[in-house]
Structures are given as structure tokens and as C-alpha cells.
């Protein structure tokens, strides 16, 4: 059995190793989730406006795209997320 000071040191070393592994994983994966562009819609009052866009998923893992509509509450979306 290890003395308490050694056990604490071993526990601390394990915690630091796990924190480093998590940091490295986040550093490698998070840049892929940065938005590349913003779509802007502008049009006249009482004039329907629509845009078509194509979404693609470069990875093999399934992904869900979140949609956020800003403006008056009378504007609506059929869903707040999209599965390509």
C-alpha cells in the first residue's frame, strides 16, 4: 500500500493526464464546428422571400444543423434543426 502522499501524487498525475487528453481532443475537433458563413435575407414588406441552400456533411458521422431565426415573432421555421 502506498503512503498517502504518494497516492495523492499518483491521483494528481492521472488527473493531469486525463485533462491533457481531453484538451487535445477538443483542440483537434472544435475548429470543425466554427460557422463558415452567415445567410442574410433582405426583402420588402409583405413579400415572400425564400432561399435554397445545400448542406453537406464532410464526415462519416451523422450531424444535425441548428437553425436560428432572428426577428419578429411572426417569422417561423418548420423546424429548428435540419438533418441532411
Image (cartoon, rainbow, N blue to C red):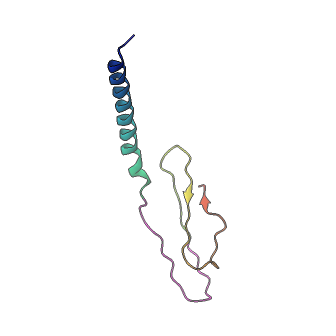
| Quadrant holding the C terminus | bottom right
Residue 69 on image: x %, y %: 56, 71
Residue 9's image quarter?
A: top left
Q: Is residue 78 above or below residue 44?
A: above
| Quadrant holding the N terminus | top left
Which sits in the foreground, 64 or 55?
A: 64
Q: In this view, does 16 lie above or below 3?
A: below
Residue 61 on image: x %, y %: 53, 44
Q: Determine the residue positioned at 48% across, 71% down.
A: 39
Q: How many labels does the image show?
A: 0
Residue 10's image quarter?
A: top left
Residue 22 on image: x %, y %: 40, 38
Residue at the front extreme? Answer: 4
Q: Determine the residue positioned at 61% across, 87% down.
A: 47
Please tell me whether the stretch drawn in magenta is mainly helix, strand or loop: loop
Give the magenta-colored segment's residue range: 35-51
Residue at the top extreme? Answer: 1
Magenta stretch holds residue 66: no
Residue 73 on image: x %, y %: 62, 77
Q: Is residue 37 left or right of residue 13?
A: right
Q: In this view, does 19 lie above or below 59?
A: above
Q: Determine the residue positioned at 41% across, 57% down.
A: 34
Q: Is residue 33 above or below residue 16?
A: below
Q: Determine the residue positioned at 58% across, 76% down.
A: 50
Residue 2's image quarter?
A: top left
Which sits in the foreground, 64 or 71?
A: 71
Which sits in the foreground, 29 or 72?
A: 72
Which sits in the foreground, 51 or 3?
A: 3
Residue at the bottom extreme? Answer: 45
Q: Is residue 62 left or right of residue 35?
A: right
Amino acid at each position: 500500500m502506498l503512503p498517502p502522499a504518494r497516492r495523492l501524487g499518483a491521483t494528481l498525475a492521472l488527473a493531469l493526464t486525463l485533462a491533457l487528453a481531453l484538451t487535445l481532443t477538443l483542440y483537434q475537433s472544435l475548429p470543425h464546428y466554427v460557422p463558415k458563413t452567415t445567410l442574410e435575407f433582405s426583402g420588402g414588406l409583405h413579400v415572400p422571400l425564400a432561399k435554397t441552400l445545400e448542406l453537406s456533411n464532410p464526415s462519416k458521422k451523422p450531424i444535425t444543423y441548428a437553425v436560428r431565426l432572428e426577428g419578429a415573432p411572426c417569422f417561423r421555421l418548420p423546424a429548428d434543426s435540419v438533418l441532411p
